[in-house]
């Protein structure tokens, strides 16, 4: 009797199509919260300026509406850097990859 194989690819494709946007949104929201915590606070404008927006089913942008946020992130010759985005992304990356691994199981 010949072996019968069934493809799990269609079911996996559906899981990816529906689950991946949720993972990206959750990761982006978590990174936004961390960036807020890491922000320098004088008036609170930079801390409140963080937002994460989905730009596609598997993409998003974490940004700050305040012009001075970039100078705080990278520093200037007169001001030390206060990284916010990079550490936020590093902190959420392991949970992002764990969620992707769980989705693919």
Image (cartoon, rainbow, N blue to C red):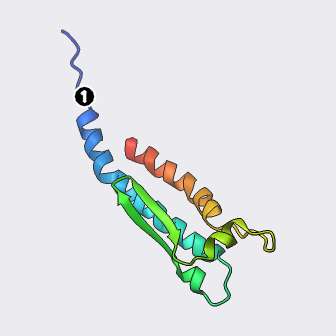
Residue 57 image position (x, y, % from top left):
33, 54
Please tell me whether residue 97 is drawn above or below residue 52 in the rendered image: above
User: On the image, which quarter does residue 14 sit in?
Assistant: top left
Residue 4 image position (x, y, % from top left):
21, 18
Please tell me whether residue 65 is drawn above or below residue 93 in the rendered image: below
Residue 13 image position (x, y, % from top left):
28, 40
Please tell me whether residue 50 is drawn above or below residue 2 in the rendered image: below
Q: Check the picture and name the quadrant holding the C terminus.
A: top left
Which residue is found at the position 62% from the left and 56% from the top? 90
Q: What residue occupies the far right of the structure in this picture?
A: 78
Residue 100 image position (x, y, % from top left):
44, 47
Residue that badge 1 annotates: 7
Q: Is residue 71 left or right of residue 35?
A: right
In this rendered view, identify the residue nearer to me: 85 or 66. 66
In this rendered view, identify the residue nearer to me: 11 or 93. 93
Which residue is found at the position 59% from the left and 71% from the top? 35
Q: Is residue 21 left or right of residue 6?
A: right
Q: Is residue 50 left or right of residue 87?
A: left
Q: Is residue 69 left or right of residue 48?
A: right
Which residue is found at the position 41% from the left and 62% from the top? 25
Q: What residue occupies the far left of the structure in this picture?
A: 1
Which residue is found at the position 23% from the left and 36% from the top? 10
């Amino acid at each position: 009797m010949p072996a019968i194989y069934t493809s799990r690819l269609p079911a996996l494709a559906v899981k990816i199509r529906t689950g991946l946007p949720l993972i990206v949104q959750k990761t982006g929201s978590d990174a936004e919260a961390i960036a807020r915590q890491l922000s320098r606070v004088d008036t609170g404008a930079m801390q409140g300026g963080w937002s994460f927006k989905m730009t596609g089913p598997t993409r998003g942008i974490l940004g700050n509406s305040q012009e001075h946020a970039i100078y705080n992130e990278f520093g200037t010759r007169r001001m030390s850097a206060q990284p916010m985005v990079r550490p936020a992304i590093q902190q959420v990356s392991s949970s992002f990859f764990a969620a992707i691994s769980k989705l693919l199981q």
